[in-house]
Image (cartoon, grey):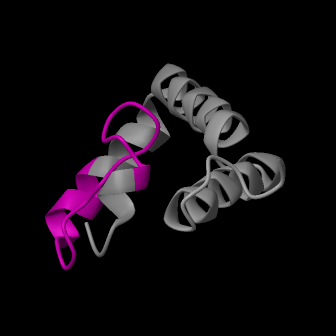
Amino acid sequence: RVGAVDEVIEDGVDGMLIDAGSVDGLVKALTRLIKDAEYREVLSQKAIEKYRRKFTLDTMTHEYEMLYGQVAGGDDLLH
């Protein structure tokens, strides 16, 4: 858990967050991933879904256009 990573990853839903420097936490997380194929699959599918919903180039570009439009006093820069 460093920086803003917890704003992107939801622990136990679409990834696993481990406190920085926590060797025990890392061992536990890796052990679970190694032993639990279903959990690995769910995490990976949820992460892919979130990426496709929030972080594609088109989505991010649109979000920045909307933000810049709001800052500039309009609803949208391109329209």
The overriding secondary structure of the stretch rendered in magenta is loop
Magenta stretch: includes residue 17:
yes
**x, y percentage for residue 11?**
30, 41
Q: Is 37 displayed left or right of 57 in the figure?
A: left
Position of 38 relative to 70 (above/below): above
Could you tell me which residue is drawn at 43 percent across and 44 percent down? Answer: 15
The percent coordinates of residue 36 (x first, y second) are: 45, 28
Residue drawn where x is 63% and y is 28% of the image: 45
Which is nearer the eye, 31 or 41? 41
Query: What's the residue at 33%, 67% (across, down)?
Result: 4
Q: Residue furthest front?
A: 73
Q: Is residue 23 above or below residue 24?
A: below
Q: Nearer the viewer, residue 61 or 66?
A: 66
Q: Is residue 46 left or right of residue 9?
A: right
Q: Which span of residues is magenta-colored?
A: 8-28
Q: Horizontal and vertical percent for residue 35? A: 43, 34
User: Number of labelled discs?
Assistant: 0
The residue lying at 30 percent from left, 75 percent from top is 3
Q: Position of residue 16 (x, y in %)?
A: 36, 47
Q: Is residue 56 above or below residue 13?
A: below
Q: Is residue 41 left or right of residue 3?
A: right
Looking at the figure, which quarter contains the N terminus? bottom left
Residue 78 vs residue 15, the one in the foreground? 78
